[in-house]
Amino acid sequence: MNSRPQADATVRRGRLKLLLIAVFFAAPVALAWLAYRFDWATGSAGNYGELLAPAALPDAALTATDGRPFPLARLRGKWVLLQFDDSRCDTYCEQKLYFMRQVRRALGRDTERVERLWVLTDGGTPRASLVAAIEGTHLARSADGRFSAAFPAARSPVDHIYLVDPMGNLMMRFPREPDPSRMLKDLQRLLKYSQVG
């Protein structure tokens, strides 16, 4: 006579156990989907550099150090690390040039996918020893300021190293006194997933 209620209780316990197991395995999947769907912050940004609204850069605003036009299209198809500084190049300027060189070298087999550009903000000529130390860096001049005006900065474009994509669009800037290891991680991630450049 008691067998029926005992059987019902056993079935209920079995169903409850099955439900708990299902919840245990389904909860992480559901939470992951919700985090993705609603873009919940995880406490760390996906990139070190600040992403900028992509903007095409003016192509006719630069000249080479010998006075000939320097079309930015010459670097099209490559990622470009770019900095602004005058020809005297103080310690901070040299540090940025060094970081750009070292980050590019650290890319290993992807080194050839990245170029470096130093945009001179005055009419002077950098010292020969510095130019030799940064061999492979393109030098161009922006005499009228139109080119640098396209680069957003809190204070001055001189404060940043910028990244231009292979299509010639400005896309990222790194902070003043950048951490080269974190710059490298950003570039490695971009090059890994990029189909261009």
Image (tube, rainbow, N blue to C red):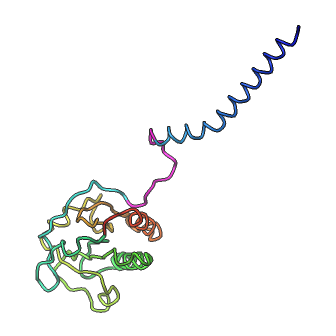
Q: Main secondary structure of the magenta part?
A: loop
Image-based side of 32 in relation to 77, left or right = right
Looking at the image, which is closer to me, 137 or 144? Answer: 137
44 in the magenta segment: yes
> Vertically, is 175 above or below 92?
above
Q: Quadrant of the C terminus?
A: bottom left
Task: Identify the magenta region.
Answer: 37-49
Looking at the image, which is closer to me, 42 or 112? Answer: 112
Total labels drawn? 0
Residue appearing at x 45%, y 55% in the figure: 46
Looking at the image, which is closer to me, 24 or 143? Answer: 24
Residue 152 x/y as whole percent: 26, 59
Residue appearing at x 30%, y 58% in the figure: 154
Image-based side of 43 in relation to 100, left or right = right
107 in the magenta segment: no
Residue sticking out furthest to the top: 1
Image-based side of 145 in relation to 130, left or right = left
Residue 167, picture quadrant: bottom left
Residue appearing at x 36%, y 58% in the figure: 50
Residue 140 x/y as whole percent: 20, 78
> Vertically, is 146 above or below 129?
above
Residue sticking out furthest to the right: 1
Q: Quadrant of the N terminus?
A: top right
Residue appearing at x 75%, y 20% in the figure: 12
Residue 192 x/y as whole percent: 42, 65
> Vertically, is 64 above or below 30?
below
Residue 81, picture quadrant: bottom left
